[in-house]
Image: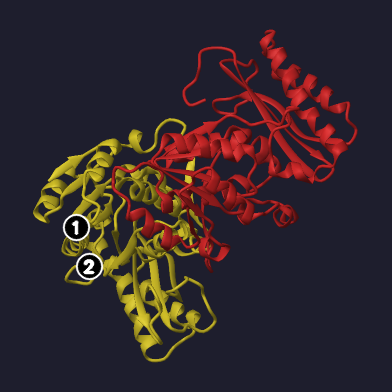
Chain colours: A yellow, B red
Amino acid sequence: MREIEKIEALRRWRKSLPADCTVALVPTMGHFHRGHLSLMQRARGENDLLVVSIFVNPIQFDDERDYHRYPRDQRRDLELARQEGVDVVFAPDNSDLYPEGYCSYVQVEGMTDCLCGASRPGHFRGVTTVVSKLFNVVRPGRAYFGKKDYQQYLVIQRMTRDLSFDTEVVGCPTVREADGLAMSSRNQHLSAGQRESALALYRALKRGRAMVEEGSRDPEEIEIAMRQVVGEHTEVEIDYLQARDAGDLSRPKRLRRCVLLAGAIYVSSTRLIDNIVVQVGEPQEGV
Amino acid sequence: MREIEKIEALRRWRKSLPADCTVALVPTMGHFHRGHLSLMQRARGENDLLVVSIFVNPIQFDDERDYHRYPRDQRRDLELARQEGVDVVFAPDNSDLYPEGYCSYVQVEGMTDCLCGASRPGHFRGVTTVVSKLFNVVRPGRAYFGKKDYQQYLVIQRMTRDLSFDTEVVGCPTVREADGLAMSSRNQHLSAGQRESALALYRALKRGRAMVEEGSRDPEEIEIAMRQVVGEHTEVEIDYLQARDAGDLSRPKRLRRCVLLAGAIYVSSTRLIDNIVVQVGEPQEGV
């Protein structure tokens, strides 16, 4: 496994490959859990070569404290990547990705205004900018993203189409702990009691799913019921808990086709997100 | 010469090329004049293959009338491209570049707020977005831009570096008519009398250059003198006429290194731009 730090070194490696070689990219912020490993395993099986990037991207954090306390453990990450058969770990530093005078950004408009975009201003702009840069350097045929960050997956898919990147964006299922908690690097901030409270989010989403499956199509009715489930836990603060169209994130009066149930909560100062997608009609393209 | 209309067809062509083949891109809005041809000639001499794109990009026009009256003559353009030894003319249509639900944009911040950016809101966002798309489809090793649009050249250079495109941005000198008028597709809107007035812009810039060469370093003093030259023509309206740093477009109290003298005027409803760069100290990188 190669470890590459510099953009120019990665470009040289990329250019040395035969034209018909398929290259996969799994962009990460490191601190791997089984969710990351599942992306690597899927990418490993579908492509000739696998690049995993590790970069805690400062411009996607709306909260500087959150950036600084984001967990990092590169040594462990490199060992796990090796075990997964990764070909290249690309771990650039800040000054190489954002040189002096940096001022260019990629923005997906509209669908970044709601859900996580509403509570984290600039977050998706930071994500789409760094992913554009990674796409330009790695030139992957396929890039793999977890659907735990469902809005991010949809936004990157739209950006990739709109900006004519020659990359297929592959969304992969959320990986959960045995008790249902969605895998997240932030879970490690939780005490045992907080972890119990954190599970309320998934329980609320499952309540929403049951309602959709039983025929409810009114987003408001479903949201009220989901909020009730979380409301039973006093130490949990809801950021949002919503039912939306899973194709374009719009919030119609009556849900149809494919429904996204998504939520973000704070357990003490730790922000956690989760979602469930429920198919209620004809499958939609790309979901 | 190939004429390609579809993004996917251009991608297929691009992928069929040997890896060591150097590809140049000259992005244009068509209606070629000698300025465009000089870009093609330079690109032709420095690369194995030459792609010229022709696309009147709606999202870079802040004024819809200007977009609709922008001159188009694809038949003549194709003939001229053939004469210049162009390998591929890429002439996509609107719906292929901007499909339904399009919402992704590339923005260079700061240096797009002044000069043309101040009077044409959204203009540079449209330019950097379409150029990003062209870069992603054509993957040129070099892309050629005229320095008549000096701010555009600088903005694209910055975007290319910032977003880690693997493309060298080459700036080429302004081509002028015998009387000094900078070549522009918009010149054809001018009557004989208006054309005479249009020359005031270049005269003003030359007046500014003379002052810089004689030792003036005060942007305000130079701007007042330049405005006086244009002010002699009552049918000319000044949009801006400024002296700035040619490296980052800042407007220092005292000019140094490399000075940009740039102006935009309206002659009746036709907007014309021009500029002169004057070296007054050590050469700067990339200028």
Percent across and percent down for residue B65 are 75, 56
Name the N-terminal-most of marks 1 and 2: 1
Q: Is residue B108 above or below residue A201?
A: above
Percent across and percent down for residue B7 are 45, 60
Q: Amino acid at mark 2?
A: Val
Quadrant occupied by the C terminus of chain A: bottom left
Q: Which residue is mark 1?
A: A33
Q: Secondary structure at mark 1?
A: loop
In the foreground, B282 or A181? B282
Q: Secondary structure at mark 2?
A: loop
Q: Quadrant of residue B35?
A: top right
Percent across and percent down for residue A233 are 34, 69
Q: Which residue is mark 2?
A: A175
- Neighbor class of circle 1 (other Cα within 10 Å; few <14, some 14-19, many 20+) is some
Q: Would residue B181 be visible to someone looking at this image?
A: yes
In the foreground, A126 or B212? B212
Q: Quadrant of residue B56?
A: bottom right
Chain under label 2? A
- Neighbor class of circle 2 (other Cα within 10 Å; few <14, some 14-19, many 20+) is many
Side of B252 where B19 appears, left or right = left
CA distance separating discs 1 and 2: 9 Å
- Going by the picture, which residue comes out furthest to the top? B214
Q: Are marks 1 and 2 in contact (CB under 8 Å)?
A: yes
- Going by the picture, which residue comes out furthest to the front? B83
In the foreground, B167 or A27? B167
At x 35% / y 33%, what residue is drawn?
A95
- Going by the picture, which residue comes out furthest to the left? A83
Side of B65 where B250 appears, left or right = left
Q: Amino acid at mark 1?
A: His
Residue B120: which disc?
A: none
At x 38% / y 91%, what residue is drawn?
A214
